[in-house]
Image (cartoon, rainbow, N blue to C red):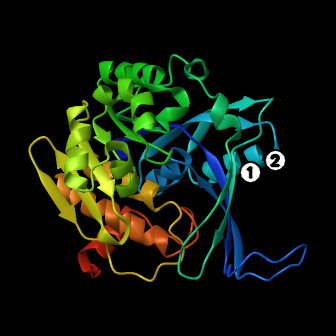
Amino acid sequence: MTDISSMTIATVGVHVLDVHAIGIDSIPEGSAGALVDTIAFSPAGTAGGTAVVLSRLGAGVRSIGAVGADSIGRTLTTLLSGEGVDTGRLVTKADAQTSASVIPVRPNGDRPAWHCIGANGVFTLDDIDDGALDGLTHLHLGGPEFLGGPAAGELLARARAKGVTTSVDILADGDPGMLEWIADALPHVDYLLPNDDQVRGFTGVDSLAEGARALIDLGVSCVALTAGADGALVVTADEALSVPAFSIDVVDTTGCGDSFTAGFLVGRHLGHDLRGSAVLGCAVAAQVAQGLGTTAGSYDLDSVVEFARSAPTG
């Protein structure tokens, strides 16, 4: 089995600061106030959230993306650094605020949100220096739609030329136009990690297995998709396999997709087969869903593996 400390991964793209408010039954009328159970910050985004979880699992992680010259950016960078993530390649955009979200979490775990795109919308390939890909074993691109398909494809092709495996997680909702926008990147993707709604939206197909195969036909090597309480489905040109979710008391599902991504990629690096990697991904997501955001609680690779061995599935 490969040592996880040999995994060096760059999480490129969307970095967000999430502000969670737990215990929201409704928005107060007018200028009235209301008490909530908890308010918390956490690093998030398809790159930033994944970076935190990967670092907690023991991988060496460097974040590549953009923040604004503001207190939100300083807070986000501090939180990432505190989790052991190398933030030296987060560039500062003086004319844009740091991307942020406010997430009121309902008692059942639902999480509507307000988003500000901010600096993620002005991050380009020019912000990635020539040495950023040196020494990597894997590159994960979160939010290829912000770069656009040709630029995302160029980045992923550069990584593959260096012997680096690649993965992509899309932030936007599923839409055929969005799939067309990033199409140039897909032939350079080893692992595409969407959710079930995105797969259906991208392809117009109700069957997740058929939708995933349609994405395989566009050049992706493997689709590992999450389906909430239904677990995960992994599809390649040769097989399709499903993995159930773990039975837990959900507090906040924010970051569960990023957490599955981190666990799945760690599993592949460790030499697990596709099913074992998806089980690990579901186990990590279950850890995160029991707290607020990616930084909630305390977990590492050993504790997640033990959880996966003993916890019931739903």
| Three-letter amino acid code of the residue under disc 2 | Ser
Residue depicted at 50% across the width and 68% down the height: 253
| Three-letter amino acid code of the residue under disc 1 | Thr
Residue at the limit of the structure toward the right, as seen here: 31
Circle 1 packing at 10 Å, graded few (<14), some (14-19), many (20+), is some
- Observer-nearest of 257 and 25: 25
Q: Secondary structure at mark 1?
A: helix
For disc 1, the marked residue is: 75
Q: Which mark is residue 71?
A: 2
Residue at the limit of the structure toward the left, as seen here: 238
Image coordinates for residue 264, horizontal then vertical, percent: 31, 53
Circle 2 packing at 10 Å, graded few (<14), some (14-19), many (20+), is few
Q: Which mark is residue 15?
A: none
For residue 38, above or below residue 143:
below
The total of numbered circles placed on residues is 2
Image coordinates for residue 53, horizontal then vertical, percent: 47, 56
Task: Tell me how far mark 1 sits from mark 2, CA to CA.
Answer: 6 Å
207 to the left or right of 128: left
Residue depicted at 37% across the width and 23% down the height: 184
Residue depicted at 48% across the width and 68% down the height: 288
Task: Quadrant for the C terminus, please.
Answer: bottom left
- Observer-nearest of 124 and 280: 124
Looking at the image, do the residues carrying marks 1 and 2 touch, with CB atoms under 8 Å apart? yes
285 to the left or right of 311: right
229 to the left or right of 27: left
Residue depicted at 69% across the width and 50% down the height: 100
40 to the left or right of 190: right
Residue 305, by quadrant, is bottom left
